[in-house]
Image (cartoon, grey):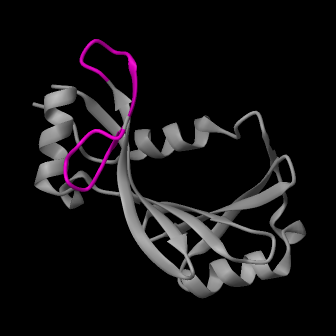
Amino acid sequence: MRTTGVTVLGLAFVATLGLRADEVAVPLDKVPKPVLEAVKKRFPTGELTEASKETTGDTTVYEVSVKQGGKNIDVTLTPAGAITLIEKQIAATAVPKAVMAAMDRAHPKAKYTVIEEIYKVADGRETLEYYEFHGTTADGKTLEVEILPDGKLKK
């Protein structure tokens, strides 16, 4: 039987992911006010836990992590406070059947530590783009799979 629950192990996995090489940790009190205000407005009951800043060429974005309802949410924003991406941790029971069936076909007996819904945000409108699964394959290899809402593999 496949393990699908998001557990303390999953939370530890997220914590150990750390920052990507092109990201720099930013103390919450140093994050631009418009960024913090936008996150607090969108997730009013969430607890802001950490932030980072990423610059690619002339483009800078901030990622703010929020803890809400026992789940982790990562919010990517412009310095002006426009949300561009939301990554919400979800339980396996919240994954649509078509998506879980595609995952089971692609990686039978995989164990998931984190499952996320990935939302693209444009003009304030959130659109579910795909589901992202993190975990290990049946033979113990690290796994990251993206599946579209219709059950097709993204990559």
Q: Quadrant of residue 83?
A: bottom right
Q: Is residue 2 magenta?
A: no
Q: Quadrant of the C terminus?
A: top left
- In this rendered view, identify the residue nearer to me: 104 or 44: 104
x 28%, y 38%: residue = 153
Q: Quadrant of the N terminus?
A: top left
Q: Position of residue 140 (x, y in %)?
A: 34, 15
x 75%, y 59%: residue = 61
Q: Is residue 118 above or below residue 66?
A: above
x 11%, y 53%: residue = 97
Q: Position of residue 146 (x, y in %)?
A: 36, 41
Q: Position of residue 130 (x, y in %)?
A: 36, 53
* Residue 30 left/right relative to 78: right
- In this rendered view, identify the residue nearer to me: 125 or 23: 125
Q: Is residue 108 above or below residue 26?
A: above
Q: Which span of residues is magenta-colored?
A: 137-154
